[in-house]
Image (cartoon, rainbow, N blue to C red):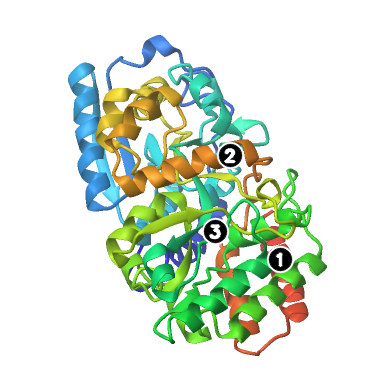
């Protein structure tokens, strides 16, 4: 994440060129058809034949170091398969990729994000990996629907995340407030505890941060038996449910137990260490499970990871779900689908690779790989792993792949949240405006 702009904001900037680039250049390659004449099914036996693969991912120093080690390790075991590794920055990654696709120079192996599965896969730029026999999909089966669009597997999750509420137990103790029972707490409990934290701290810190992204919406809507999008790529919610969400947001901000509007605006674009939770200025911090170590290292607190509250006071009805942190995809124009599949299989299913990457790309889906990784994790990383295991029996749904045009939905939700908390719009008006804007983005991309 940038010091100035969040990943979602960078994504919004990058997306502005994607649709135009595809339309002007014309991808011209069907993701279900042959890959440069190789046929629709990539044979597993071809995985180690001679190939030089372009391999690209957005990165940080840690990810770059171990990814390059894994690629060298793979080549050491299979000398005919070599790589052109190209780590990049999130800020420019998607602009570069859209240009590459337009120029028919897209990478063979692509690190992909859920927001862009439909943008690229739906326009024929990604291979249907269900036809790539060099990837063993069996141990990954539980995660595959999250990368499947119209029956085609365009992305395989690198690992699982789940949304939750970080609690800084150090601050709770200072304020004299007990942690909630996260299996039974409600939104009223959440608001009440935020106020107790604010009061108990004597004003030194507040109750909670707030993200207001599409992940928050997904959870809230599912608690109302609705969802952001349907399996058919349509709007899956009613405006009334969205209005109630903005009403909850307004209640938190009006209480003074959450962030101020100015703090919210800073938080949604800040790096981890510059957020309210990262600086130890709030007791609760909404986050993805794989972020807990980064937050702990920043705020130095003793952290716990809690389930989101619910309307019903039941963990089985809180709407939580598994979400991939990122995906592996294969460019539809590749000449080497089997070899590309082979290295993806190595990252996902090899314990040798797992010992190098651990859970940095999120918690492995393959149970055998997870068993090797878990003892090697830090104490806080293990909190994230344990959280995923604790909620497994409670998860009842998997959100469909977001439809084309919706990769900026989080930024749109945050903008309308700002309208509410700054008093520029009522919750009902913000809900109606968000719905209209989201429908417009989807219609423009269709």
Return the residue nearer the eye: 248 or 117.
248
**Counting residues from the N terminus, which is met first, the one under dot 3 or under dot 2?**
3
Task: Give the percent coordinates (x, y) of residue 306.
Answer: 52, 54
Task: Give the percent coordinates (x, y) of residue 378.
Answer: 28, 44
On screen, 111 above or below 430? above
Q: In percent of the image, x 62 and y 58: which residue is there?
A: 406
The residue labelled by disc 3 is 20
Q: Quadrant of the N terminus?
A: bottom left
Q: Residue furthest front?
A: 176
Q: In percent of the image, x 72 and y 48: which residue is there?
A: 233
Return the residue nearer the eye: 54 or 102.
54
Q: CA distance from mark 3 to mark 2?
A: 26 Å
The residue labelled by disc 1 is 440
From the image, state whether disc 3 or disc 1 is nearer to you: 1
Label 3 crowd (10 A; few <14 / some 14-19 / many >=20): few
Q: Quadrant of residue 330?
A: top left
Task: Give the percent coordinates (x, y) of residue 342.
Answer: 37, 22
From the image, state whether disc 3 or disc 2 is nearer to you: 2
Q: Residue furthest top?
A: 45
Q: CA distance from mark 1 to mark 2?
A: 24 Å
Residue 30 appears in the rendering: no
On screen, 139 above or below 303? above
Residue 257 appears in the rendering: yes
Q: Is residue 253 left or right of residue 365?
A: right
Question: What secondary structure is marked by label 2?
Answer: helix
**CB contact under 8 Å: marks 3 and 1:** no
Q: CA distance from mark 3 to mark 1?
A: 16 Å
Task: Give the percent coordinates (x, y) of residue 155.
Answer: 51, 37
């Amino acid at each position: 994440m940038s010091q100035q702009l969040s990943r979602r904001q960078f994504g919004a900037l990058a997306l502005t060129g994607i649709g135009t680039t595809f339309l002007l250049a014309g991808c011209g390659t069907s993701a279900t058809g042959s890959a440069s004449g190789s046929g629709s099914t990539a044979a597993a036996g071809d995985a180690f034949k001679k190939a030089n693969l372009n391999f690209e991912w957005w990165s940080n120093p840690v990810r770059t170091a171990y990814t390059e080690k894994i690629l060298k390790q793979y080549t050491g075991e299979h000398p005919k398969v070599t790589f052109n590794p190209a780590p990049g920055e999130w800020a420019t990654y998607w602009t570069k990729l859209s240009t590459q696709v337009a120029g028919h120079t897209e990478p063979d192996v692509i690190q992909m994000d859920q927001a862009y599965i439909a943008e690229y896969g739906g326009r024929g730029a990604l291979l249907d990996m269900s036809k790539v026999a060099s990837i063993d999909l069996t141990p990954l089966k539980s995660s595959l629907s999250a990368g499947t669009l119209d029956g085609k597997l365009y992305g395989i999750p690198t690992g699982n995340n789940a949304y939750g509420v970080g609690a800084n137990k150090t601050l709770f103790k200072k304020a004299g407030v007990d942690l909630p029972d996260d299996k039974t707490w409600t939104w009223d409990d959440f608001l009440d505890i935020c106020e107790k934290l604010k009061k108990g701290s004597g004003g030194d810190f507040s109750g909670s941060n707030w993200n207001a992204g599409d992940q928050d919406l997904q959870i809230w809507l599912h608690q109302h038996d609705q969802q952001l999008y349907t399996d058919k790529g349509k709007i899956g919610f009613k405006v009334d449910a969205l209005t109630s969400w903005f009403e909850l947001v307004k209640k938190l901000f009006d209480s003074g137990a959450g962030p101020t509007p100015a703090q919210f605006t800073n938080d949604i674009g800040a790096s981890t260490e510059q957020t309210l939770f990262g600086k130890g200025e709030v007791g609760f911090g909404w986050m993805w499970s794989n972020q807990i170590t980064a937050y702990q290292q920043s705020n130095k607190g003793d952290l716990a990871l809690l389930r989101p509250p619910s309307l019903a006071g039941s963990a089985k009805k809180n709407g939580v779900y598994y979400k991939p942190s990122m995906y592996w995809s294969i460019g539809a124009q590749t000449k080497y689908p089997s070899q590309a599949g082979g290295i993806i299989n190595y990252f996902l299913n090899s314990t040798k690779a797992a010992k190098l990457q651990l859970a940095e790309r999120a918690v492995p889906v393959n149970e055998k790989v997870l068993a090797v990784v878990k003892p090697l994790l830090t104490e806080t990383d293990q909190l994230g792993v344990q959280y995923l295991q604790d909620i497994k029996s409670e998860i009842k749904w998997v959100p469909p792949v977001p439809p084309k045009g919706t990769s900026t939905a989080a930024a749109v939700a945050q903008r309308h949240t700002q309208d509410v908390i700054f008093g520029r719009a009522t919750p009902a008006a913000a809900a109606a405006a968000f719905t209209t804007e989201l429908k417009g983005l989807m219609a423009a991309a269709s």
